[in-house]
Amino acid sequence: MKTRKILHVDMDAFFASVEQRDFPELRGKPLVVGGNRTNRGVVAAASYEARRFGIHSAMSMATAFRLCPHLHRQPHRMSVYQEESRKIPEIFSRYADRVQPLSIDEAFLDVTRSSARTGLTATRTAFELKTEIKKVTGLTASAGVAPNKFLAKVASDMDKPDGLTVVQPHEVQAFLDPLPVKKIWGIGPATAQRFRRMGISTIGELRFLSLEELVEEFGKAGLHYFQLSRGIDDRPVETRGRAKSLSTESTFSNDVRDPLVLRRTIEGQSLELAERLEESGLLASTVVLKLRYSDFQTVTRSRTSTLQRSEEIIRLEALELLEKTEYRERAVRLLGVGVSGLTEDDVPVQLSLFS
């Protein structure tokens, strides 16, 4: 089987970088994009300077300012970010036959055939893409080059900002083994904690578990962990989806009044939905929030905007919809996030980059 050449390209702190580009006085300073400076305001994006203070997306704005009193804040300008994202697909089309946008600021590219046609190596293609993106937008992107999507996405995150990480086929296990298990798609904090209780913290340690042991402990997900820990991911870079509707919800064992618990739940649900949209090759235009209070009254809130499948946008929209409920006054029993208005991603829309 011919080795594939897959790129993952991810814009660096996209929203914050656009603001620092447009407002030079903010360059080199800790910056967040998001709501106002209150407990109700939420960080949508943080510059790398802000991240050094422990600030991250989905954090309350009040907490962010406590961590960094001299923090700068900009309101989000979604129309500007979308306009910038429209410039990227045309660049991709020059280098790749197959492009799979993931969100407003990242995408997968399969350059296997185009590399053979142009004579450019996958690494050289990634370098030229990054250079062209910087020339056209004034923004930096990081890229991962690898034999499959999983490895390329992990690689793109290794040397941010403005990084380029290449994983050759013979380097796969040496690349993966030292990494924490949370680098495997689908392993969140709770699952990582289960692995830690088993004495496993790295992918290399996970790899010593047999398929039978993993399936016994984690069910169907065990096969997923078994394959990815060995760098096995046969999913194609594709532009058409199959799923028709997507949602996820959590029923709490005890009624919740803590806003931080609700925000973290939305963060995890948004990530899950973005990954499912990606795997299905779909875009969504509407984000839906579902809330059930302790007295079993159920309310829904929704917002429709542009086609996307960005975890960041889903999360931001859901968090803003949360503010339109009574969660601060009433205990919450169930919380869910969904997306609708689904469209297969061969419809022309503004989207993001990626390798």
Image (spheres, rainbow, N blue to C red):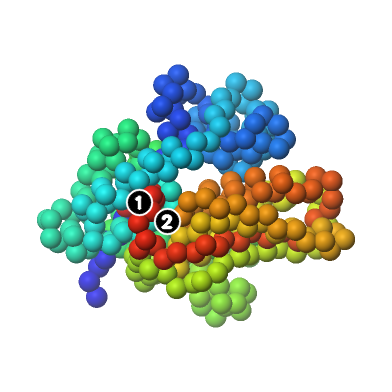
Residue 352 lies, with reference to residue 229, above or below; the image says above
* Residue 230 in sight in this render: no
- Pick whichever of labels 1 and 2 is earlier in the sequence: 2
Under mark 2, the amino acid is Leu
Image-based side of 293 in relation to 186, left or right: right
Residue at horizontal 84 percent and vertical 50 percent from the top: 330
The numbered dot on residue 102 is 2
Under mark 1, the amino acid is Phe
Find residue 350 and report its horizontal and vertical position in percent: 38, 50
> Depth check: 116 or 76 in front?
76
Find residue 109 and report its horizontal and vertical position in percent: 30, 58
| Secondary structure under the numbered disc 1 in the rendered image | loop
Q: Residue furthest top?
A: 25
Residue at horizontal 22 percent and vertical 71 percent from the top: 2
Category of crowding for the residue at label 1, using alpha-carbon neighbours closer than 10 angstroms: few (below 14), some (14–19), many (at least 20): many
* Residue 312 in sight in this render: yes
Quarter of the view holding residue 189: bottom right
Q: State the separation of the CA atoms marked 1 and 2.
A: 8 Å
Image-based side of 36 in relation to 327, left or right: left
Image-based side of 219 in relation to 322, left or right: left
Residue 11 lies, with reference to residue 235, above or below; the image says above
